[in-house]
Structures are given as structure tokens and as C-alpha cells.
Amino acid sequence: MTTEEYNKCVDTYSDSVYRFALKTLRDEEAAKDVVQESYLRLWENRKNVIKSKEKSYLFTIAYRLTIDKIRYSKKFTDDKLLQNIRNNSGAEYDNTGEILLSALNELSPQQRNLILLRDYEGYSYKEIKEITGLSESQVKVYIFRTRLLLKKKLDNLVR
């Protein structure tokens, strides 16, 4: 990978990697750290990355970094939005995005990442397989089960 190809990769994918990390971590500084570390590792391993696989490589690194940050910080147990929704379970919400966010926040990190990669970022099952290291059939099953769980959670939050 040349410097020009690397710069093109930064221009093309940095926003997507940042959005993915931000949706997963819900912390702007942590998301920026993930993006920076992902691109640093891409540069360090530029000779080993296949030319057409930069995007997959970046998201694989970002995925693993977000999982590491989640494991070390226990950030999702102290979520204020989730606490407010539980405390105000009788209140109705008009904001669909807030309802969806709270339902996503109740998912496990792996479930949330799979849904974000598939439905938010638009990756194919094969690409998600490469990013997460799961088999393609596992990815399909996990996404299917997570969608069912998410639907159930959304039904409960809306009512």
C-alpha cells in the first residue's frame, strides 16, 4: 500500500469507522481513539493488507478495539439513558431514535456490533464473517436471533 492509497483509504472510510465506533461505544473520544488506532495498525501492516480488503481490515480492527474497550471499561452498565428509561417505564416516547437507541443499548456488545455492521453500515454476511471471525452461518443465526430480540425489546419499550 502506497501513501496515496493510504490517504485515499482515510478519506473514504474514516467517517464510517468513526460512526461504527461511536454507535458501539457512545463516547466520542473513545470512538476517535478507535479510528486513530485502526488507521495506525493499517499503516503498520500496510504490506500485509490485500489491496481490495482495506475496508474489511479497518472494520475488523475497529470491531476488536471496541470489544476490548467494552471489556475493560464496563461502560454499558452505567448508561444514564438506559436508567432513565427503566425509571420511566410508564412514560411514552415520541422519539423513535431514542427508543431504538435504548433497545440497542440493552443488547450484548456482540449483538449490537452485528446489527450495526449489517443494518447500519450495510455489510454483507461474508464481510461480517471476515470482520468478526465468526462463520457465515453463525453470523446469519446471530443476526436473526438479535433481530427477534430487538423486535421484542422495541415492542416492550413502545408499550
Image: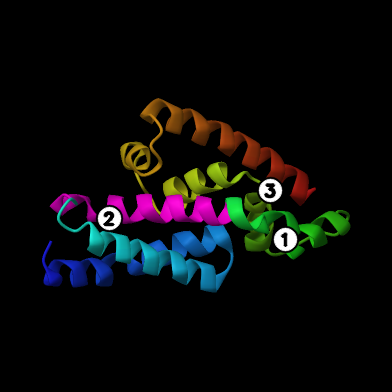
Q: Choose between 89 and 3: the one closer to the eye.
A: 3
Classify residue 120 by image quadrant. bottom left
Image vertical order of residue 57 relative to residue 136, above or below = below
Q: Earlier in the sequence, mark 1 or mark 3?
A: 1
Q: Main secondary structure of the magenta part?
A: helix
Kind of residue at badge 3: Glu
Stretch of the chain drawn in magenta: 50-70
Classify residue 41 by image quadrant. bottom left
Q: Which mark is residue 45?
A: none
**85 left or right, relative to 65:** right
Q: Which mark is residue 106?
A: 3
Image vertical order of residue 27 relative to residue 118, above or below = below
From the image, state whether disc 1 or disc 3 is nearer to you.
1
Q: Is 118 one of the magenta-colored residues?
A: no
Kind of residue at badge 1: Asp
Q: Earlier in the sequence, mark 3 or mark 2?
A: 2
Mark 1 closeness class: few <14, some 14–19, many ≥20 residues within 10 Å: some
Identify the residue under disc 2.
55
Kind of residue at badge 2: Lys
Q: CA distance from mark 1 to mark 3?
A: 10 Å
> Can you give x and y, in whole percent of width and height, for residue 95 in the image?
69, 64
> Can you give x and y, in whole percent of width and height, for residue 6 in the image?
19, 67
